[in-house]
Image: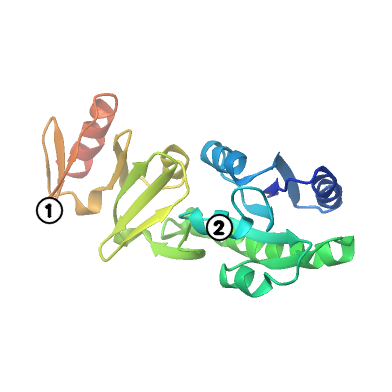
Amino acid sequence: MSAGCLIIDDEPFARKLLVEHVSKVEGLHVVGECVNAVEATAWLRAQPVDLIFLDVQMPEISGLQFIRSLKNAPAVIFTTAYRDFAPEAFDADAVDYLVKPISFERFLRAVNRFLDDYEAISGSERTSRADDHVIYIRADRKTVKLALADVRYIESLDDYVKVHTSNKAWVTRENISKLAQHLPESFVRIHRSFIINTRFLTAFTGESVFLDKQELPLGRAFKHAALQQMKMRHP
């Protein structure tokens, strides 16, 4: 599985060099280039990415300010002409901090650090989804392993989803339709914004679904299929 990266830098030469470096690395590809944080924000709303190459010094909003503004930021490798920001960068959980001009050797060391984690997570996802026991999500700047048996319901929040467990709600940058493809049959899509785990289903009507005291709406487009699935599990 190839990881998609976004390059954010206001210097054309710097972007071109990173594109060239990425082209030499198997398992990594460029999905886009942005010249500032405003462009990058719009891009991330439209298409999630796995890794950001982010310049620190940019007009209007710095790279550090930008990454702190994201609720669930992708992995980030900072690129800059200044060494002074390294402590702040690593406080922001950066994978690495590259000082320009960036040699391919130094670039490769940083990327391999990211790819080791990315491939391990991807492999774990494939195994867990096949077993229908756990799922991995990116939340709070880390990868979180959740037992599917503890997931009560999943809620769509535009560009994010909120995974509600028995003890906590986790917010991750994900598409609810995409996430639904990896869930076992015990999970039922009841609304364009909600997927429930029928293990927690206590009652339902033609308009609502109840998980104990939690009432969720039954969407018109999903009603017929959802009612059939819930009746099969709760005759």
Where is residue 55? Give x, y as percent.
70, 55
Tag 1: amino acid: Asp
Q: Is residue 49 visible?
A: yes
Q: Residue placed at 13% from the left, 30% from the top?
A: 206
Left or right, 110 with reference to 136: right
Task: Tell me the SS state at disc 2.
Answer: helix
Name the outermost residue toward the front.
60
Q: Residue placed at 76% from the left, 66% from the top?
A: 82
- Identify which residue, 41 or 200, lies in the foreground: 41
| Quadrant in which residue 121 is drawn | bottom right
Q: Residue placed at 85% from the left, 52% from the top?
A: 21
Between marks 1 and 2 in the image, the one whose residue lies nearer the viewer: 2
| Quadrant in which residue 76 is drawn | bottom right
**Mark 1 or 2, nearer chain start:** 2
Left or right, 119 with reference to 185: right
**Label 1 belongs to which residue?**
212
Q: Residue placed at 47% from the left, 49% from the top?
A: 173
Residue 87 to residue 72: above or below: below
- Identify which residue, 220 or 15, lies in the foreground: 15
**Label 2 belongs to which residue?**
65
Where is residue 49? Give x, y as percent.
61, 47
Query: Which quadrant, please, contains the C terminus?
Result: top left
Task: Tell me the SS state at disc 1.
Answer: loop
Left or right, 10 with reference to 90: right
Report crowding for label 2: few under 14, some 14 to 19, many 20 or more residues within 10 A (C-alpha): few
Left or right, 110 with reference to 200: right
- Identify which residue, 214 or 62, lies in the foreground: 62
